[in-house]
Image (spheres, helix red, strand yellow):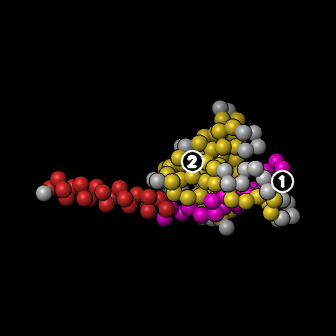
Amino acid sequence: MRIALKLAVAAIVLSAMPALASDDPIVGVWKTEPDRKNLTSHIKITACGDKFCGQILSAYDSSGKEVQTPNIGKKLFWDVSSQGGGGYGGGEFWVPLINVDAVPQMTLQGDTLKVKGCEHHICAHQSWTRL
């Protein structure tokens, strides 16, 4: 009987983990700063199991007009974990302008998400705002 109870508790805890991640404050839609082509993007961050991933939803030119790019719909980052205290990291971050994968570091401060990606000694960073 004790084994059955332990298995039931473990199943409840494991099934709640994705729900806990989906309630994380990083989940939502974020607006990037302009990139080198002067485009801003909307990034949707969702729970992917017990981690987080981000997908490019849309892109806009400097006048705010929506534009089509081949990157819309692509994953921007994946396998990012909460590290507590508003910090997120691990996983991979794809940098579309130079087509490389980088190690992401993110810090959530209210409705601002500071995003940094590094590949070897080269790093880039942006501040995203919640929509």
Question: Is 38 within the magenta?
Answer: yes
Question: Which image quadrant: the N terminus?
Answer: bottom left
Q: Nearer the viewer, mark 2 or mark 1?
A: 2
Q: Position of residue 32 (x, y in %)?
A: 72, 57
Name the residue beneath numbered marker 1: 38
Is 70 magenta? The answer is: no
Tell me which amino acid carries mark 2.
Answer: Trp
Q: Which residues are magenta?
A: 23-44
Q: Residues within 10 Å of mark 2 (few under 14, many from 20)?
A: many
Q: Secondary structure at mark 1?
A: loop
Q: Which quarter of the picture shows residue 42?
A: bottom right
Q: Is residue 8 left or right of residue 50?
A: left
| Disc 2 target residue | 78
Q: Residue at x 69, y 37 (%)?
A: 100
Position of residue 101 measured from the top left corner of the image (x, y, whole percent):
65, 39
Name the residue located 79 percent from the left edge and 57 percent from the top edge: 68
Residue at image coords 81%, 59%: 67
Q: Quadrant of the C terminus?
A: bottom right
With 73 as the anchor, is 49 left or right in this view? left
Q: Are marks 2 and 1 in contact (CB under 8 Å)?
A: no
